[in-house]
Image (cartoon, rainbow, N blue to C red):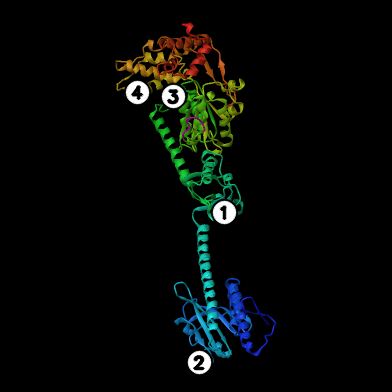
Amino acid sequence: MSLDPNADGAVSLEPGQVPTGAGEASVISVVRSDLRALEAVVQGTARGSGEEFFRSLVGHLAEAIDVHYAVVAEFPKAPPHVRTLAFWERGRVAPNFEYDFTGTPCAEIVRGGLVHYPTGVSKLFPHATPLVERGIDSYMAVPFLDVEGSILGHLAVFDERPMPAEPRRGFIIRIFAARATAERERMRAEQRLQESERRYRDLYENAPNAYLSVGTDGHILSVNRRVTEMLGYPAEELVGALIHSFMPDTTSGKHRSLEIYRKHLDGETVAGWDLELRRKDCRPLWVQVWMEPDRGADGTVGASRAFFIDITDRVLAERERARLQQQNLYLQEEIKSEHDFEQIIGHSPALMEVLGNVRRVAPTDASVLIIGETGTGKELIARVIHSASKRKDKPLIKVNCAALPAGLVESELFGHEKGAFSGAIARRPGRFELADGGTIFLDEIGELPSDAQVKLLRVLQEHEFDRVGGTAPIRVDVRVIAATNRDLFKAVQEKTFREDLYYRLNVFPVHLPPLRQRRDDIPMLVHFLVNRFALRIGKHLDGVSQQTLQRLQAYPWPGNIRELENVLERAVILTTGPTLDVAPDLLPMPAPGPNTPPSDRSETGPREEMIEKDAPLNSGRTVVQPTEGLQTMEIVERDHIVTVLQRTNWVITGPRGAARVLGLNPSTLRNRMKKLGITRSAR
């Protein structure tokens, strides 16, 4: 080591240069020792962290103070229990250990301040076995404290040689102790942070609610376990995916998701918004969303934090309640409405044949097509089939296809989503949803528009349909009973009715005979209806005159039982005596005299329509048995319709229209007028 004066006269020592002059030897030695200690302090307190730091610290502490042993220890429980963090022993890092400081020099550490035994340690502390075994003669230690003044541990050095008191050693060990205190505090803070993070991570992962983070590009950044359970995807498939890809293309799905995304980009919060998602198995999932965007130091919007609450059960329950309310409302309206019949009356062979077919088909789930003229009781037969089926505990939903507006047929049958069209202010279940598990009766099926026919065919084939404006198919279990007064087979040939739908509906046809083919049932029907009307009006009638019964049996009843009901109700209102007598002017045509034998009436009566005996059940064809009275029947029917039209001033629809008086559907009346050549000029 050499000594070279610098500009201000200070002396610097170069390594390897030996000083000259006997008077300078002690100065050079002190400077060299201080430089080495300073270098050890710098290296020992500036390198690494944690365990690496403490191992470096004890090594450089031993070098700085020039001892063989150095240790840094903590009090993990409470004094006198000690655990070493690093132990330097004669040029190497030794394994850590724990001990009880009772009977050792470090026991005085708890009092605070520097502890120093320059010599005689082994003799002063004979029970300090680790020190005695190593022949330790000197010992120095200093505690390190936390910010509140509590002792965290201590730093100690010891040696086999004496350790005279020198201020330099005390300063050095305190410097190391201060650095050890800072590092230990940092480690404790890091441990608390890790523990806190572990607890929050555990809470995040095992929370009952779904938590996720979404970037400003709409891609998912992180999810917790509950999100994976809700959606059915593993975390690796969710992270990085576009959040909107899990939303269905519905108003409450993708549209609402984009609204939330726009709020995210605008830095706005979302609280309790309903959102529709799709699981991996395509099942719907409804959640409530809370979303809070993060902001950077400069105020820019970053990723959003959101959590979901599963409300699927609530939504489904609300929809089911709405469906039941609609169903209940419908059934209440049905109860309030007046049905044409309360029970089937009659024992004619034609009626018995129909009832036999009804008993056979009712227990099955086969589609039934009821064919008959207006007023023959098609709805009553549908109710009988439903009541005798295994679906009798479920609703029978009635739909008059001819009464539905053309633009709303699909909405009425299959329902619609909110916003599907103008005026669709809320989701509404259709008649098929209301009939799920039960039976739907489609009256006047021949009037169904072609677009609705396609959807109806899908329900019959696949048992599912889509709401108007909907995207997800809805499965239903519904038995279909249809009815018509039209010749559907002819409509198929004329391409006004789908052939495939016709054969789907016509699995089991039931042909209802008109009242003119059930003349033997007329007396029973008359007595039943008269008693009902008399009770309703508040009159007491003893019976019906024989002349009236003959007159009623002779009349052709083009409006069938509905017309009979109207005539009898009018007669009950008008009668003044105890016996009902239907005046001839109540019927549009004069009835044969009472002496005319029933067997002769066929010659002048209306034509008879009969099902061909050899025709298959699903043929849908009828064979007209021509009679000599064919022209007479057409004339009678034509005159009857013209008479009613004249009474109503040729008004067809409305409460006082001819269709209401005749008990016919307006479209049916117009068809009959066209067929019979009736125009207003025909008066």
Marks 4 and 2 in Cβ contact (< 8 Å): no
Residue topped by disc 4: 531
Q: Nearer the viewer, mark 1 or mark 2?
A: 2
Mark 2 Cα shell of 10 Å, populated few (<14), some (14-19), many (≥20): some
Residue type at mark 2 is Leu
Q: Nearer the viewer, mark 3 or mark 4?
A: 4
Q: Nearer the viewer, mark 4 or mark 1?
A: 1
Marks 3 and 1 in Cβ contact (< 8 Å): no
Residue toward you, 363 or 285: 285
Question: Mark 4 or mark 2, which has the lower sequence index?
Answer: 2
Residue drawn at the location 58% of the way across and 33% of the way down: 458
Side of 249 where 2 appears, left or right: right
Residue topped by disc 3: 346
Residue topped by disc 2: 124
Question: Mark 1 or mark 2, which has the lower sequence index?
Answer: 2
Residue drawn at the location 54% of the way across and 24% of the way down: 446
Secondary structure category for the residue under label 4 = helix
> How far separated are the C-alphas under marks 3 and 1?
75 Å
Instruction: Pinpoint residue 147: horizontal percent, then vertical percent.
Output: 46, 72
Mark 1 Cα shell of 10 Å, populated few (<14), some (14-19), many (≥20): some
Identify the magenta region. 420-425
> How far separated are the C-alphas under marks 1 and 2?
63 Å
Instruction: Pinpoint residue 152: horizontal percent, then vertical percent.
Output: 49, 76
Residue topped by disc 1: 222
